[in-house]
């Protein structure tokens, strides 16, 4: 009997399964790239909830976070676009909500 190779870590298998199961939409791509692009602290306070014509609406936990992220707009936009493969985001729109 021949082995198929060495075992893969379970985390790698789960990530591959999630990637394959996710819908192939611009918003799904942005949501997948969000946390690695902006960091855990920002991702805990804000999340992308809508995309339309290149504009991504980011729902922030408070007005303070929305204002802070608005000030960081260009940096966050560049980091997000660097993390995306094919999708390009042209603008981030911060709104107050409850992520």
Image (tube, helix red, strand yellow):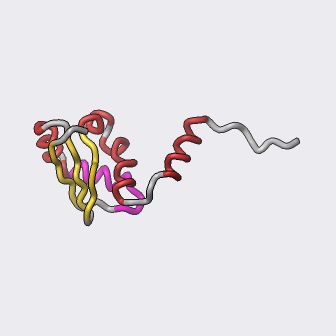
In which quadrant of the rendered image does the C terminus lie? top left
Q: Is residue 79 magenta?
A: yes
Side of 91 relative to 82 (left or right): left
Q: Is residue 87 above or below residue 38?
A: below
SS assignment for the magenta stretch, majority: helix
Side of 83 relative to 42 (left or right): right
Q: Position of residue 52 (x, y in %)?
A: 26, 62
- Residue lying furthest right: 1
Q: Residue at x 26, y 37 (%)?
A: 42
Q: Residue at x 18, y 46 (%)?
A: 72
Q: Is residue 13 above or below residue 55?
A: above
Q: Position of residue 79 (x, y in %)?
A: 30, 50
Q: Residue at x 40, y 62 (%)?
A: 86
Q: Is residue 41 magenta?
A: no
Q: Position of residue 75 (x, y in %)?
A: 23, 49
Q: Is residue 26 above or below residue 60?
A: below
Q: Is residue 46 above or below residue 24?
A: above
In which quadrant of the rendered image does the N terminus lie? top right
Q: Position of residue 17 (x, y in %)?
A: 55, 46
Which one is nearer the viewer's eye here, 47 or 92?
A: 47
Find the magenta span and give its range.
Answer: 74-87
């Amino acid at each position: 009997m021949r082995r198929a190779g060495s075992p893969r870590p379970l985390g790698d298998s789960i990530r591959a399964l999630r990637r394959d199961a996710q819908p192939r939409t611009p918003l799904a791509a942005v949501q997948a790239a969000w946390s690695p692009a902006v960091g855990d602290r920002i991702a805990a306070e804000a999340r992308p909830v809508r995309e339309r014509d290149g504009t991504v609406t980011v729902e922030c936990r408070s007005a303070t976070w929305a204002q802070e992220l608005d000030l960081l707009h260009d940096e966050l936009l560049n980091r997000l676009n660097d993390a995306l493969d094919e999708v390009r985001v042209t603008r981030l729109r911060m709104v107050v909500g409850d992520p």
